[in-house]
C-alpha cells in the first residue's frame, strides 16, 4: 500500500502502486501456461474528474459523495450481459437509488493466458446516485451494501452462467477496484484506464494472489472491497460457523428490516480472505470505525502482553466476548478510502 502525506491526490500514487505490484510478482502465482495469473489488482479512491468526463451520463455526475461507482464483472455472452444489467437496474430502483448509466471498461486481453481468457468476463462500470430519501453519505454506503448483497443473492439463483460470472468487485462512493485473473505485470496493460493521468488518488492498495484453499477465479482476485491478504486464516472453519450461528440474533437500528437481506454475511465457497473482508464489511457498516472493526477481528496477542496498557487490554477482553479472532495472518492492509492501515 502507498499514500501521500499531503492529502493531495495525484497519478503518481497509482503509477507507483502498480510498480509495487509488479515488484510483488514473486509473491503471486500463475498457471502452467505462464500467462494466467492467480489474481492481481489495485484499489484506490474514485477519481471524480476522470469519471465526470468518461461516464457520459445524461446531465453529468453529481458531486463526490452523492454518487457511487460499481465495478462489475458480467457474463461474456451478450444476452446474459443484458440480463445482468436489467437485474442491476431493477434492484437499484427497488432500493430508491437512481441508476445514472453504464460504462464499458476498455480492456486489452492479448497477453492473457488461455485459462484467464476462457473465463474472462465483460467488465462494466455503473453509476448510482444517492436517492432523495437517503440522509447522508454513511446511509448511502449502507444502501449500496444492501443493493450489492441483494444482487449477489439474485445472481446465485439465476443459472450457472450468471452465478459463475456475475461479480461486483466494488460499489462505493469512495473507492474502486480494478482486478482480475491476471499476473501483476498484466494489470496496467489489461486496464488502459490505469494509465490515464486523470486517475488520481491519495492512496492505493495492491495485491498479487497465490491460490491455496480455492482455485483462481476472476472474482477472487484481490484487493477485495476493504482489505487484501496473502496467507491462511487458520481458524477459518470456526470463524465461518460462529458467524452463521450469530445471524439469527443480528439486530441493528441502522438497517432495520434490511438486515435480513444482508444474509448470509459470508459467501459459501469464498476464499478465507474474501470471508474476512465480508465480516469486516458487516462490522464497519453497523457503526464501528474501520480500525475498531479490524481490532475486533484480528486482535493483538493481548492476554499475556505485560507491556500493554490497561485500556487496550480492556478493549480486547470486552470484544473477546463478542467475536472470536480470525487467527493466522501476520499483516493485513485495509482501507475504506479514508483510513489506510495494516
Image (cartoon, rainbow, N blue to C red):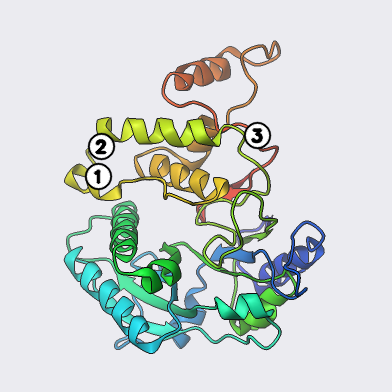
Q: In this view, does 231 lie above or below 184?
A: above
For the residues marked 2 and 3, what is the alpha-carbon distance in whole angstroms?
29 Å
Q: What element carries label 2?
A: loop
- Precedes in sequence: disc 1 or disc 2: 2
Q: Mark 2 points at which residue?
A: 252
Figure label count: 3
User: For the point 44% across and 68% down, which residue is it?
Assistant: 164
Question: Is residue 36 something that shows in the picture?
Answer: yes
For the residues marked 1 and 3, what is the alpha-carbon distance in whole angstroms?
29 Å
In the picture, the quarter occupied by the C terminus is top right
Q: Is mark 1 on a helix, strand or loop?
A: helix
Q: Where is residue 167 in the image (x, y as percent from the top left)?
A: 43, 67
User: For the point 82% across and 60% down, which residue is it?
Assistant: 26
- Precedes in sequence: disc 1 or disc 3: 1
Q: Nearer the viewer, mark 2 or mark 3?
A: 3
Identify the mark at residue 328; answer none if there is no mark. Answer: 3
Badges 2 and 3: C-beta atoms under 8 Å apart?
Answer: no
Q: Position of residue 229 (x, y in %)?
A: 64, 48
Q: Position of residue 35 (x, y in %)?
A: 74, 76
Task: Count neighbours of disc 1 (C-alpha within 10 A) and say few if under 14, some if 14 to 19, many if 20 or more.
Answer: some
Q: Which is nearer the eye, 57 or 207?
A: 207
Q: In this view, does 129 lie above or below 258?
A: below
User: For the point 25% across and 44% down, which residue is it?
Assistant: 259
Q: Name the residue under label 1.
A: 259
In the picture, the quarter occupied by the N terminus is bottom right
Badges 1 and 2: C-beta atoms under 8 Å apart?
Answer: yes
For the residues marked 1 and 2, what is the alpha-carbon distance in whole angstroms?
7 Å
Amino acid at each position: 500500500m502507498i499514500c501521500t502525506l499531503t492529502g493531495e491526490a495525484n497519478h503518481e500514487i497509482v503509477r507507483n502502486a502498480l510498480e509495487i505490484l509488479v515488484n510483488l510478482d514473486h509473491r503471486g502465482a500463475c498457471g502452467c501456461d505462464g500467462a494466467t495469473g492467480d489474481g492481481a489488482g489495485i484499489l484506490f479512491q474514485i477519481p471524480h474528474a476522470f469519471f465526470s468526463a468518461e461516464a457520459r451520463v445524461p446531465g453529468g455526475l453529481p458531486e463526490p459523495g452523492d454518487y457511487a461507482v460499481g465495478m462489475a464483472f458480467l457474463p461474456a455472452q451478450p444476452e446474459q450481459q443484458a440480463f445482468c444489467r436489467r437485474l442491476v437496474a431493477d434492484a437499484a430502483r427497488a432500493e430508491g437509488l437512481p441508476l445514472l448509466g453504464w460504462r464499458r471498461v476498455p480492456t486489452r486481453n492479448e497477453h492473457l493466458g488461455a485459462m484467464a481468457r476462457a473465463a474472462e468476463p465483460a467488465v462494466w462500470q455503473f453509476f448510482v446516485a444517492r436517492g432523495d430519501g437517503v440522509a447522508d453519505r454513511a446511509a448511502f454506503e449502507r444502501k449500496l451494501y444492501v443493493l450489492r448483497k441483494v444482487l449477489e443473492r439474485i445472481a446465485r439463483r439465476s443459472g450457472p452462467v450468471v452465478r459463475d460470472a456475475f461479480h461486483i468487485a466494488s460499489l462505493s462512493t469512495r473507492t474502486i477496484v480494478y482486478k482480475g485473473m491476471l499476473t501483476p505485470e498484466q494489470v496496467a496493460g489489461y486496464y488502459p484506464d490505469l494509465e490515464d493521468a486523470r486517475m488520481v488518488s491519495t492512496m492505493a492498495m495492491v495485491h498479487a494472489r497465490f491460490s491455496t484453499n480455492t482455485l483462481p477465479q476472476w472474482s477472487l482476485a484481490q484487493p477485495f472491497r476493504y482489505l487484501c491478504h496473502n496467507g491462511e486464516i487458520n481458524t477459518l472453519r470456526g470463524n465461518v460457523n460462529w458467524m452463521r450461528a450469530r445471524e439469527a440474533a443480528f439486530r441493528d437500528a441502522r438497517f432495520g428490516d434490511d438486515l435480513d437481506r444482508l444474509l448470509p454475511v459470508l459467501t459459501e465457497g469464498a476464499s478465507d480472505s474474501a470471508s474476512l473482508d465480508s465480516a469486516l464489511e458487516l462490522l464497519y457498516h453497523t457503526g464501528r470505525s474501520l480500525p475498531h472493526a479490524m481490532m475486533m477481528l484480528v486482535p493483538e496477542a493481548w492476554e499475556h502482553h505485560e507491556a500493554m496498557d490497561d485500556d487496550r487490554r480492556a478493549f480486547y477482553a470486552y470484544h473477546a466476548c463478542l467475536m472470536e479472532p480470525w487467527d493466522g495472518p501476520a499483516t493485513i492492509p485495509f482501507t475504506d478510502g479514508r483510513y489506510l492501515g495494516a
